[in-house]
């Protein structure tokens, strides 16, 4: 028989409900549990609200709960002479739960991917004191843009060529640092689903090609970036964080890279927190986030809270984010927050809104003792010129 206990998510909530149902009073339950009466009532209200979302609230004639991961979208009843005659329960998937299930499915899907054999070619001389950071911001692979509408063309082929040409240029002009970090700052993919809409807001997106094609090209492009970096650096760390466009595929991409490079000792996939990830290089602490859920001014405090030991042991701290597609760099107490431009084209929404920032990609060089010591920038025009030159030479 269904009861309120079935909708508790923690042991503490379960203890509150059981004590309340047994003693019949929030005051008595609070005394037994060592809680004040108001906290007991708040806990009960939260549990009751969760139960109602799942379709169970007997006081309101809701007695048909829907199974996980669904929630009640609409509940309609028809009363005749004060008695319940008919009832309609419309259910829909809970977004957060559905998202978690899809992430688990992505993990399972990539588990059997073939593993690459270790590369034996390693740069003969590297500078172990240096780390080169390659941020990839908002590539939006899978987006389609038409020149007549947006002022520039963009599709899957263009996205891959621009990314890989930029990476090739930047790696070739960066020092042979011992470590390289390739960080996707979110929205590497333009959409998470076959419908071409954002999961949370339902915005319709302009898509290029089938989803399977987009995923295949995304894997190939990211692998090409990693392989290019391996020719110049001794170790390559891969960091990926979810954006508002690719909450699922960003997780799948990290899982794919981890499985593909499982036998490659020179490649490490950062498995940190889902929303924000960190890496350290001597006295330098780097954070990576997409930026659609947090304010820039909050990020230093978040870094200090999530990485207190690293914060205390470092002198140079940087948080890199994407989302807004243009450059911005601000220094707060103890940490520099840098918003990174994208190499991607703009879609109709951005063009119509007048968001016309320039496009480029960067490589940022950090010394383990002295922080940032240099950076390289590859504009979109330069990347395409280098690609044309390489094609002509071939």
Image (cartoon, rainbow, N blue to C red):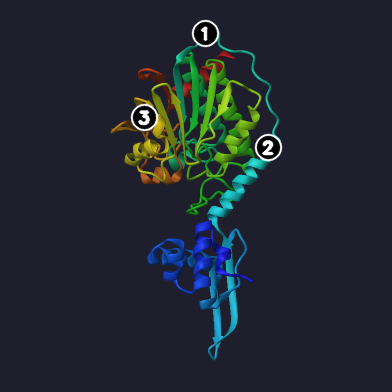
Q: Is residue 54 above or below residue 100?
A: below
Taking 246 as reference, is 303 left or right? left
| Residue where numbered disc 3 is placed | 312
34 and 179: which is toward the camera = 34
On residue 111, the disc is 2
Disc 1 or 3, which lies upstream in sequence? 1
Residue 210 seen anywhere in this rendered image of the structure: no
Taking 202 as reference, is 193 left or right? right
Image marks 1 and 3: residues in contact by CB distance under 8 Å: no
Quadrant for the C terminus, please.
Answer: top right
202 and 31: which is toward the camera = 31
Q: CA distance from mark 1 to mark 3?
A: 32 Å
SS category of the residue bearing label 3:
helix
Residue 92 x/y as whole percent: 57, 62
388 and 322: which is toward the camera = 322
Q: Is residue 4 above or below residue 362?
A: below
Q: Quadrant of residue 303?
A: top left
Image marks 1 and 2: residues in contact by CB distance under 8 Å: no
Quadrant for the N terminus, please.
Answer: bottom right
Residue 5 x/y as whole percent: 56, 65
SS category of the residue bearing label 2:
loop
What residue appears at the point 55 percent right and 82 percent down from the top-left corner? Answer: 78
Disc 2 or 3, which lies upstream in sequence? 2
Label 2 or label 3, whichever lies nearer to me, is 3
Taking 260 as reference, is 277 left or right? left
317 and 26: which is toward the camera = 26
Crowd class of label 3 (few under 14; some 14 to 19; many from 20; radius 10 Å): few
Q: CA distance from mark 1 to mark 2?
A: 35 Å
SS category of the residue bearing label 1:
loop
On residue 125, the disc is 1
Crowd class of label 1 (few under 14; some 14 to 19; many from 20; radius 10 Å): few
């Amino acid at each position: 028989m269904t009861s309120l206990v079935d909708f508790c998510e923690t042991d503490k909530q379960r203890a509150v409900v059981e004590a309340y149902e047994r003693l019949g009073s929030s005051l008595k339950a609070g005394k037994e549990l060592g809680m004040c009466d108001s906290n007991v009532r708040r806990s009960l209200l939260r549990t009751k609200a969760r139960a109602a979302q799942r379709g169970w609230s007997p006081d309101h004639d809701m007695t048909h709960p829907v199974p996980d991961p669904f929630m009640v979208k609409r509940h309609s009843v028809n009363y005749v002479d004060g008695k319940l005659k008919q009832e309609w329960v419309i259910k829909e998937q809970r977004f957060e739960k559905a998202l978690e299930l899809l992430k688990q499915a992505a993990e399972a899907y990539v588990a059997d991917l073939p593993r690459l054999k270790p590369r034996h070619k390693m740069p003969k001389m590297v500078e172990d004191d240096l780390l080169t950071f390659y941020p990839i911001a908002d590539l939006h692979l899978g987006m389609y843009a038409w020149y007549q509408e947006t002022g520039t063309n963009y599709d899957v082929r263009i996205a891959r060529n621009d990314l890989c040409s930029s990476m090739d240029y930047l790696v070739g002009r960066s020092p042979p640092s011992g470590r390289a970090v390739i960080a996707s700052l979110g929205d590497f993919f333009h959409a998470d689903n076959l419908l071409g809409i954002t999961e949370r807001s339902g915005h319709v997106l302009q898509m290029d090609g089938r989803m399977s094609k987009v995923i295949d090209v995304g894997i190939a492009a990211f692998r090409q970036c990693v392989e290019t970096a391996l020719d110049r650096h001794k170790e390559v760390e891969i960091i990926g964080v979810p954006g508002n466009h690719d909450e699922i595929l960003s997780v799948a991409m990290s899982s794919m890279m981890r499985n593909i490079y499982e036998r490659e000792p020179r490649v490490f996939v950062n498995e940190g927190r889902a929303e924000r990830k960190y890496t350290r290089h001597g006295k330098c602490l780097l954070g990576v986030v997409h930026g659609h859920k947090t304010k820039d001014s909050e990020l230093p405090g978040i870094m200090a809270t999530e990485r207190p030991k690293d914060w205390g042991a470092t002198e140079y701290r940087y948080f890199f984010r994407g989302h807004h597609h243009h450059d911005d760099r601000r220094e707060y107490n103890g940490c520099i927050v840098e918003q990174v431009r994208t190499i991607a084209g703009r879609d109709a929404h951005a063009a119509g809104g007048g968001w016309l920032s320039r496009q480029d990609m960067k490589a940022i060089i950090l010394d383990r003792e002295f922080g940032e010591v240099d950076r390289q920038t590859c504009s979109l025009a330069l990347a395409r010129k280098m690609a044309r030159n390489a094609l002509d030479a071939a």
